[in-house]
Amino acid sequence: MSLKKTLDVAGISMAEFGVMCGVSRTAVSKWCGGLPQHVLRRNEVAELVSAIQSAIVNGDLPIDRKRVTVAERRYATKIAIESHGRLR
């Protein structure tokens, strides 16, 4: 599954993913457009995407946006991803 599709299915914005990776939203947008990640970030991004995909498969993501505040959703997303892999 592509990065953009993974983020869409998980309900994670490019800005939120950028914060998780320690990069800008613009960098994530470029990655979604097909540009490769920097060699020093590639493994970290791959681990994070794998954890997100695992959380999707197990039904932990996406978080229902209607029932929680933005802060609660971000926290729940972080917990869901951490339970399936490493999150910095």
Image: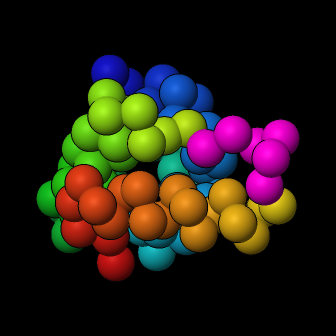
Q: Is residue 23 above or below residue 55?
A: below
x and y percent of residue 5 in the render?
A: 48, 24
Of 35 and 7, nearer the camera is 7
Quarter of the image where the C terminus is located: bottom left
Counting from the top left corner in percent of width and height, residue 63 is at 61, 44
The correct choice, above or below, for 67 with respect to 39 in the image is above
Q: Is residue 63 left or right of residue 41?
A: right
State whether residue 20 appears in this view: yes
Q: For the point 22% across and 60% down, which residue is it? A: 85
In the figure, is residue 7 to the left or right of 13? left
Q: Residue at x 69, y 39 (%)?
A: 64
Would you say the magenta stretch is mainly helix, strand or loop?
loop
Q: Position of residue 83 (x, y in %)?
A: 28, 61
Magenta-colored span: 63-68
Looking at the picture, tell me which residue is in the foreground, 55 or 28: 55
Quadrant holding the N terminus:
top left
In this image, 27 relative to 26: left or right?
Answer: left
The correct choice, above or below, for 10 with respect to 74 in the image is: above
Image point (44%, 65%), residue name: 79
Rendering coords of residue 82 (x, y %): 32, 65
Q: How many marks?
A: 0
Does residue 35 appear in this view? no
